[in-house]
Image (spheres, rainbow, N blue to C red):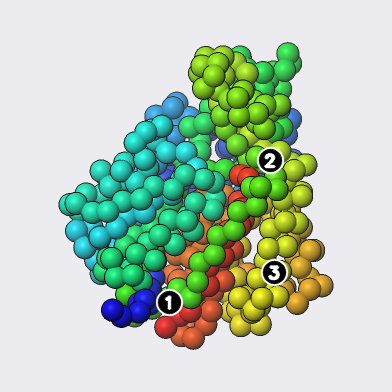
C-alpha cells in the first residue's frame, strides 16, 4: 500500500447575496426592536469596523437564498475555478453555525441544491471553526485516496435570526424596549454568505498545497461564550436547556436567540493566542516563513487585541502581511475564511512558493483552527 497523497486546493469560490448594505441602512433593513433605534448599534459598528455586508433576507422578510442555496452557489464557483462540475465530486463536507433545518444535516441540504449525483457527505455544526473541520475531513479523504475530488463549504444565514420578532416579547428586551447587549451586538456584526474550496490530489495552475490543518478545542476550560439554545443565566446547566421547557417558554426566556458573553470573550482571546504561541514554540508554525496571514476576527478591535498580545513575541507576523475582507464583506462566520482566501487568490498577490497561514478562532466554546498553505 502507498502512503498518503498530497491534497491541493485547486479552486475557491464565494457567494454574497443581494447588494452591499451600508451602516446607515442596517436598522432599516433588519428592523428596529420595539420601533426604537438601538442604543448599542453605533458602538458595535465602531468596534467591529464593518462598513458593508450582505443579507439574504429583505426588509419585508422576503428570502432571496437559503443557507444551502448560498453554499451550493459557492461550491459551483469553486468547481468552476478548478475546471470541474458537481458530478466530479466524491465528497461534500458542509459547515455552518445554524442550518436551514434542525434536521437533516446541512450537507444533505447543500447536496440537494447542488445536484451532481450520488456522493459522500459530511455535516459540521459549530461556529466559525466548523469551516476548518469540514476542510480537514475533505483533505484527509483526498489524502487517503478515498476520493479524487472533494469540496468543503461553509455558509451563514444570520439575518433571519435578527428580525425584531425574534426578540420582542422575550426576556431579552426590557420595559423600555431596549435589547440586551449580549444579543444586540451580534445583530450589528454578523451577515450572510457562503464560501467553498475544492481539494484534489494533483495540482492545477494556481493550486495551493495544504501542509496541515490543526483544530484545537479548549471547551474543557471555558463555558459557552457564543451560543443559542439557552437563556443567558442558564447556558451552563444542561438540564435547563430549551428542550425541557419547550420552544414557546424557551422563546419567552430569550433562549432561542444567538448570544455573546463579552467578558468571557476577553479571556478566550488570550487562550487563542496561547495556543498559537504553543504552535510557534513547537515549530509547527514559523512566522518568518509566512507571506500572507488570513486571520478571521469578528471586529477590528479584536484584531487590535490580538496584535497587542503578539507584537512583542516571536510569534508576530507583521501586520503588512495580514489580509482581510471584514470591512467590505462583514463577518460571515464560518464562511469568512473562504471569502478571504478567494479574495486573496483573485487579488493576484500570491506567488509561487509563498506560504499562507489561515487562523480561525471561534468563541463558541473556545476553539481555534490553523491551516498552512503553500502556493505551487
Direction right: furthest residue: 312
Residue 262 or residue 33, whichever sits in front? 262
Image-based side of 372 in relation to 276, left or right: left
Of residues 113 and 58, the one nearer the viewer is 113
Q: Which mark is residue 209?
A: 1
Residue 188, given in percent of the width and then of the height, sits at 62, 39
Q: Quadrant of residue 253?
A: top right
For mark 3, what is the residue? 278
Q: Is residue 93 visible?
A: yes
Of mark 2 and mark 3, the one earlier in the sequence is 2
Whether label 2 touches label 1, CB < 8 Å = no
Q: Position of residue 72 (x, y in %)?
A: 32, 50
User: Against 28, is 131 above or below?
Assistant: below
Gap in angstroms between the C-alphas marked 3 and 1: 23 Å
Which quadrant would the C terminus be assigned to in this image? bottom left
- Judging depth in this view, the residue of 213 and 256 nearest the camera is 213
Is disc 3 placed on a helix, strand or loop? helix
**CA–CA distance between discs 2 and 1?**
36 Å
SS at circle 1: strand
User: Horizontal and vertical percent for residue 183?
Assistant: 65, 32
Q: Which mark is residue 223?
A: 2
**304 relative to 135 in the view: left or right:** right
Name the residue: 37% across, 61% down. Answer: 138
Horizontal and vertical percent position of residue 374: 48, 79
Q: Is residue 322 left or right of residue 202?
A: right
Label 1: few (<14), some or many (≥20) within 10 Å? many
Q: Along the line of sight, which residue is nearer the eye, 289 or 78? A: 289
Residue visible at 71% across and 62% down?
A: 273
In-image side of 54 versus 176 (left or right): left
Amino acid at each position: 500500500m502507498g502512503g498518503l497523497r498530497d491534497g491541493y486546493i485547486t479552486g475557491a469560490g464565494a457567494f454574497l447575496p443581494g447588494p452591499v448594505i451600508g451602516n446607515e441602512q442596517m436598522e432599516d433593513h433588519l428592523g428596529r426592536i420595539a420601533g426604537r433605534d438601538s442604543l448599542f448599534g453605533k458602538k458595535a459598528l465602531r468596534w467591529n469596523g464593518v462598513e458593508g455586508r450582505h443579507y439574504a433576507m429583505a426588509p419585508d422578510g422576503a428570502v432571496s437564498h437559503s443557507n444551502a442555496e448560498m453554499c451550493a452557489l459557492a461550491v459551483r464557483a469553486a468547481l468552476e475555478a478548478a475546471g470541474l462540475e458537481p458530478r466530479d465530486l466524491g465528497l461534500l463536507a458542509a459547515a455552518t453555525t445554524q442550518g436551514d433545518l434542525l434536521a437533516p444535516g446541512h450537507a444533505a441540504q447543500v447536496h440537494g441544491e447542488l445536484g451532481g449525483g450520488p456522493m459522500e457527505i459530511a455535516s459540521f455544526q459549530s461556529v466559525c471553526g466548523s469551516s476548518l473541520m469540514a476542510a480537514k475531513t475533505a483533505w484527509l479523504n483526498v489524502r487517503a485516496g478515498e476520493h479524487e475530488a472533494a469540496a468543503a463549504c461553509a455558509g451563514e444565514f444570520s439575518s433571519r435570526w435578527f428580525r425584531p420578532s425574534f426578540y420582542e416579547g422575550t426576556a431579552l428586551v426590557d420595559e423600555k424596549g431596549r435589547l440586551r447587549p449580549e444579543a444586540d451586538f451580534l445583530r450589528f456584526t454578523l451577515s450572510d454568505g457562503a464560501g467553498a474550496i475544492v481539494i484534489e490530489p494533483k495540482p492545477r495552475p494556481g493550486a495551493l498545497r495544504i501542509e496541515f490543518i490543526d483544530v484545537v478545542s479548549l471547551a474543557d476550560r471555558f463555558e459557552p461564550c457564543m451560543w443559542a439554545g439557552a437563556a443567558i443565566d442558564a447556558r451552563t446547566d444542561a438540564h435547563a436547556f430549551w428542550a425541557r421547557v419547550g420552544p414557546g417558554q424557551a422563546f419567552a426566556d430569550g433562549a432561542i436567540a444567538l448570544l455573546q458573553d463579552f467578558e468571557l470573550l476577553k479571556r478566550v482571546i488570550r487562550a487563542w493566542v496561547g495556543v498559537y504561541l504553543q504552535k510557534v514554540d513547537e515549530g509547527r508554525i514559523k512566522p518568518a516563513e509566512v507571506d500572507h496571514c488570513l486571520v478571521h476576527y469578528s471586529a477590528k478591535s479584536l484584531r487590535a487585541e490580538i496584535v497587542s498580545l503578539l507584537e512583542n513575541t516571536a510569534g508576530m507576523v507583521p501586520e503588512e502581511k495580514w489580509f482581510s475582507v471584514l470591512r467590505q464583506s462583514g463577518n460571515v462566520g464560518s464562511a469568512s475564511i473562504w471569502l478571504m482566501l478567494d479574495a486573496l487568490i483573485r487579488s493576484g498577490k500570491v506567488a509561487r512558493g509563498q506560504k499562507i497561514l489561515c487562523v480561525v478562532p471561534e468563541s463558541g466554546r473556545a476553539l481555534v483552527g490553523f491551516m498552512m498553505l503553500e502556493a505551487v
